[in-house]
Amino acid sequence: MKIRTWIAGYFLAMLLCGINSYLTLKVGVIEEGVCITALLYAGTLILMRVKISSEELALVATMGSAGGAFGFIANFYAAFYLIGQPMTFWQMVIFSLLTSMLGLVTNIPLRQLYIVEESLPWPGSQAAIATMNILGGNEGKKQTIILFVFTALSFIYVFGSQILELAKMPALTYFGFLGLSASTIGLGIAWSPFIIGVGLWIGTRVGIGFLVAAILLTLFAPIIAQVDPGKPPHQFIWPGVMFMVTYGLTDLLMQWKTTIRAFQSVFSTRKSDRFNKKLDEVMSAKQFYILTAAVMLALTIFMYYSFNVPVHLTIIMAIFGAGIFNLIATRASAETAFNPIRIMSVMLQGVCAMFGGAPTAVNLSGAGFASGSIGQSSVLTSDNFFGRHFGVSAKQQWWLQLLVLIPITLVSVFVFMKISTIYVVGGDTLSSPIAKMWASMARMFGGELGSLPKMAIESMWIGGIAGILLSFGNAWVNKSLADAEGIKKLILGLTPHPFGIGIGLILPIYYSIAFFFGAILLCEIIPRLFKTDENTLYSVASAGLVGEGIASLIGAIMVASGLVKPILEFFTLHLPWMIK
């Protein structure tokens, strides 16, 4: 590994961590930064006329994405601040390091399961592969031009629609339905290049699943408004979350042979036929056991003395947060490029409450436990997909992410401590929406389960049963598709995928419609009408992800810095038709 790769990786990881630590508290979003890291690094070397390979880009992107994802943990620091129990410097540092280390431990079996054993789409990683191939000079001049042109178009549209909010570039288009307030329930379509581009990798069936979820939320919006007034229907998360939990677990149980092979490759000397020792081995089974025990022991002691979390509750957090919910969240990321880590954090808060972790601080620690462990595990597993594609070993990526943990932890804590002295956490300037949600849920779970919204428990039963049934149904569809031909294959190929339904039930309706639109447009309409080749489709879709990611990052920085106002004044003076 070259010295320039180390230097650039560390620098970009710390840069993205610092930016995202601020952005997530400012507006509730982060940009993990795989493609952005690759573009920044490659762009710099191209300007210096230095040749670069896709493999080198993969190594730098692994480090950069670790920093970008780590910024999300700042929400946990802010949540404790909001409940009036601000964490000390060392509490923030040690908690973040230990939960992230647990995430790195769980990444090892997750990689084996979701990358080596299963063939999952990984849309975000597919976009990274396409981008790195082009930047590394492997796809020719045509694909390079397509990527950069469509990235520029995506950037311009997202910046104009979401940052400047220009009327001629709408971010959303709302639909009317049976007298319902479309803007209140979120009925419409988001003109997001990122989401529409992801449609290529999620495929038609998952896209139709999103459409089904959008229809369900629209139809049940009046009922949800009665039991949980004042909120759009997707914020009644209980049926959707339980649907995802039961669907994910049932799917794992039905693929028990695959799951056992994956864990055998980690926990024993007996390896799967798919296992490539050079590419896939991170450490021996003995080393894995020792590391897991050491991390859990350190976490248990720290949680007990810092947050008064009982020993049994830390173990339960690890089983559910770093285990079950991590499996579900990472699978969601692999299927749709959407990682429901925020929802999984709330779910772990609920689990804590059920097992005796009702006190607010104890309960809130569950949200941080999930965000730390799932965040690092999931992003590294995603990086492992493009790493394996380019022949980068799992061991190398694992150690790169481990070695970058200490500097990005210090950056995250430093940024939070500085901005919390300048701005009011939870105020207008630093709204901290995710931290507010976690803090509110901790206070709610601090009471009895009866403090949940009306119909929450009943809806979880309905969602849970539906998840189990549709998991069996999806297994039958997949089996039938393998041998289907003609009209039967067409019909089966249009059946909604349960994962699209589950994710769609906890997303705004306009996002689900956009996922559906992107899947149909890029998987069905454009290939059939224009005979577009696969590489061109990949370049266009990847450009949507990259362009929106860069625009969101730069735009959020400009909003926070007050630089958007002069641009709007320019449009008002010289291009008034754009803002009317």
Image (cartoon, rainbow, N blue to C red):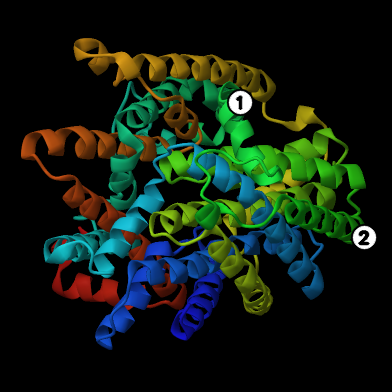
Task: Tell me where residue 218 sits by quadrant.
Answer: top left
Q: Whole-percent x and y of residue 362?
A: 84, 50
Mark in the foreground, 2 or 1: 1
> In the image, 475: left or right of 524?
right
Q: Earlier in the sequence, mark 2 or mark 1?
A: 1
Q: Quadrant of residue 306?
A: bottom right
Q: CA distance from mark 2 to mark 1?
A: 38 Å
User: In this view of the protein, which residue sits in the foreground, 306 or 164?
Assistant: 306
- Disc 2: which residue: 305
Q: Residue at x 40, y 53 (%)?
A: 125
Mark 2 lies on a secondary structure that is helix
Up-down relation of residue 558 to residue 342 (above or below):
below
| Rendering coords of residue 512 (x, y %) | 38, 35
Residue type beneath disc 1: Trp
Residue at point 28%, 71% (across, down): 568
Pick the front one: 173 or 100: 100
The relative height of residue 100 versus residue 438 in the rendered view (above or below) is below
Residue with the most extreme top position: 488
* Circle 1 residues within 10 Å: few <14, some 14–19, many ≥20: few
Q: Is residue 190 visible?
A: no
In the picture provided, is 256 more to the left or to the right than 526? right
Residue in the picture at 33% in, 54% down? 127
Residue extending furthest toward the bottom = 48
User: In the image shown, does 565 or 49 lie closer to the viewer?
Assistant: 49
- Circle 1 residue: 256
